[in-house]
Image (spheres, rainbow, N blue to C red):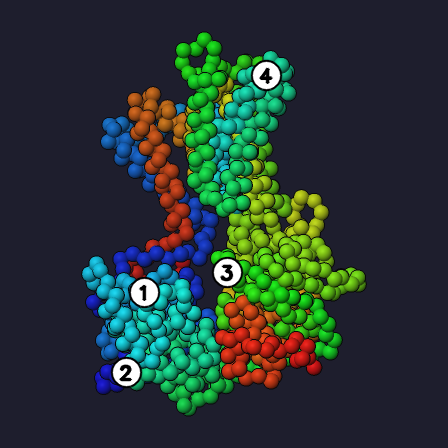
Amino acid sequence: MSKIHGKVREPLLRMAKRDGISSQKAWLIRGIAFLLSLMTGALMILALGHNPLAVYQAMIVGACGSGTVLQETVKIAVPLLITAIGISFAFKMKFWNIGGEGQILVGAVAAGYFGLFTAHIFPKVPLVLLMMTAGMLAGGIYGLIPAVCKAKWGTNETLFTLMLNYIALAFIKYLMNGPWKAPGSSYPKIAMLVKGARLTKILGVHWGWILALILVVVSSIYLKKTKQGYEIAVVGESNNTARYAGINVSKVFVRTMFISGALCGLVGMLQFAGADYTLTEGTAGGIGFTAITVAWLAKMNPYGMLIVSVFIAILERGANAIQTQFKIPSSAADLLIGIILFFMLGCEFFISYRLILRGKEEKDA
Amino acid sequence: MAETKKLAVKMHKVTKTFGKVIANKDVDLELREGEILALLGENGSGKTTLMNMLSGIYFPDYGEIHIHGESVTICSPKDAFALGIGMIHQHFKLVDVLTAAENIVLGLDGGLTVNRKEVNRKVAELAQRYGFEVDPAKKIYNMAVSEKQTVEILKVLYRGADILILDEPTAVLTPQETEKLFAVLRNMKKDGKSIIIITHKLNEVMSISDRVAILRKGEYIGVVNTAETNQSQLTEMMVGRPINLKIDRPQVKKKEARLKVVDLTCLNGDGVKALNNVSFTAHGGEILGVAGIAGSGQKELCEVIAGLHPAIGGSVLFTGEHNGEPIKERILELKPDEIAKRGIAMAYVPEDRLGMGLVANMDMTDNVMLRSYKENKGIFVDRKTPRALSEKLIEELEIVTPGVDTPVGRLSGGNVQKVLLGREIAYEPSVLVVAYPVRGLDINSSYRIYDLLNEQKRKGVAVIFIGEDLDVLMEISDRLMVMCGGRISGIVNPREVTKDEIGLMMIHVGEEKTDDEEVEE
């Protein structure tokens, strides 16, 4: 029928928002994206002179091949999952808390204070409870600061929380070099937590993993079924609507950021008392940032975060395994993780939009 | 081909879809050179989409466009300008801190420097030619809405457009300003410009246009010569069936003072007085209309009453009853939930429906419970009651939705408003404040909304109706309050004043204020 003539041609590619997509189709797109990412990664592995299939196999074996490595994988997934849940609380109300890292660190420091200096006073159970409370309180308060400032003066929470990360990091370095420096050590390091105060292991991993699973269920109920969860959702959608509904927006900001920070602080305590048994500048180790990826990939759904955090933990463990097995440099292994995550995040675009080629007529999907 | 030559624009079988929504289907449109064509249609009938394709904002899925007899492809606003097509949008696209002249030359090719003197001279010359009043050196932020519109039109003319498209240009103007604009449009027509004016106001169509093209639900219905038609024929073509355009104004016997506002003063976000000593009384059983140019303090007035905006002086007094007990309460400075806690059912339908009244991404249940989710005990929300209420509202108000679980943002404008108003009415208010309740709604939905408001009035609710269409306000209100620059220029009996008088009040604060009680019958 009618063709378009003229001096100017139709644009090569056009973008159109999808009206909604069946979950089958969405998963198909994600599946394709995953395969493409593996293929792209394979090119890199080939360039390094290895067999991609062997490398991928080694990654899987290295992450879940035996009980011991599986425990290691879980150990990576637990802090990631809890931090992601914590961060998602803030993200749900569009409060961009990228200070998970700092909140983890202050949580670890607070727990560390009791763990390192009061272990001889308290028996194990009260001590662990004390460390937990201290870690969560410290993380919560650290999260509270940017929330109060935003509620009072409208400060930008993104910059604020980011800067707080560096303060926490520098504070740990100060402790390592100064007041908390292990006696008799020539290196700047902090003493180890005494064996009796370390978290009990269940199936080979400290009990944090059970807590994480409980948190998945509890947070899901909190966000979906409670009044406070509803308030978070309304504030996240529109501050104006929230005010109109009689919600005290500042209060929700402060309360939710306290919870968000407290969960991150809890991670700090778990890392200190369950995984590392000491404090270093690597205690948070980028968890606070990776958790952002987890939360987004899971679209703020706690059950989704469970899956994604395990997935990322497998990637990280796998990347470790291939470093030793194939002598692939760690930067290249990280690159591989980056490629896979890039594709997984990028494919969400194709779930929300479709592209129309020049000359192709639009048909209903 | 002689016929085509006289055509400035010819659109042939133009189709545009957004996802599953068909905005325009096989639309034909012809604009003759040197004529004013009114493009008439209800909200959502695809007028703006069609014109956006002409001005290069959208690209049609199918169809041909001819300009001055030549087939063209318009990919961007730049292409449109090259063809001499200029569109004046409903929402102005001006840079506030620049002057009129600077805005006019913004984005034009040229050297690195702007010869302001030369530009000012050229702009002034252009303005004089068509009868605009404009100061080229005035900054945009100092301008009234009508001045900004003038700048938008000049911007298009300066670029040498000979085909002008105006999207609802009179929506923001007073009756007097509208007349001025029409005079300018007639001058431009004399000068040989071809003009399309998008509107849904019939009286304006009759007074300015040569021909009228009508769209309905994205389809082209036909074109008629303005001289050979009348308003009821146009309405019928627009809606698809004959319709009675009269708005009811039922009489309610029992009227009592419900909300007394005394010397209310408040600041807007920039610290400028948005309300200045505003005093009035709203009575139960009446609709108090509020007229005024956009931004005269209507929004602040609503928000102060609803407890969403702080005041710096004055008071708001509520008189009514709750569970049979009479209450008298100062409600100024109370938050919305505190007002509710005192047993005062204050309903507010804000102007920004999806940005304040509702949450677009939430389903109907979650939206219906927005104002009442705190009512049940315990930490969990009760979704059963609002769900049942949602289902009831869908049935009673004939809300078209796939179901209660569909996000309200997916519904059409009329249905969104029904959800919002339905929720507010469901809580049996004693004061109902509605801001621009029919903006963007089709005729059917609009009349449904008027009926709902009248029903509330009969129930003894004090209804405060902030409106923009003077014809509607004058028909539905029992009393009409006119605002200007944050003050009340008068409260009049709409049966006894003319539109021109109200128009004058919209731009002047009257010396003597009509007494509140005088117009009571």
Measure how far apart labels 4 and 1 are at the Cα level: 70 Å
Mark 2 belongs to chain: B
Residue type highlighted by circle 2 = Gly
User: Tag on residue A118?
Assistant: 4
Circles 2 and 1, Cβ within 8 Å, touching? The answer is: no
> Which residue is identified by label 2?
B192
User: Which x, y percent locates residue A150?
Assistant: 51, 44
User: Which x, y percent locates residue B152?
Assistant: 35, 70
Toward the right, the furthest residue is: B324
Badge 4: residue crowd in 10 Å (few <14, some 14–19, many ≥20): some
Which residue lies at the image location 35% right of the left edge and 56% below the top edge? A15
Residue type highlighted by circle 3 = Val
What secondary structure is found at the residue carrying circle 1?
helix
Mark 1 belongs to chain: B
Measure how far apart labels 1 and 3 are at the Cα level: 25 Å
Mark 2 or mark 3, earlier in chain: 2
What secondary structure is found at the residue carrying circle 3?
loop
Q: Which quadrant of the view contains residue B135?
A: bottom left
Which residue lies at the image location 33% right of the left edge and 23% below the top edge? A323
Front position among marks 2 and 3 = 3
> Which residue is identified by label 1?
B103
* Residue A3 is at least partly visible in this image: no
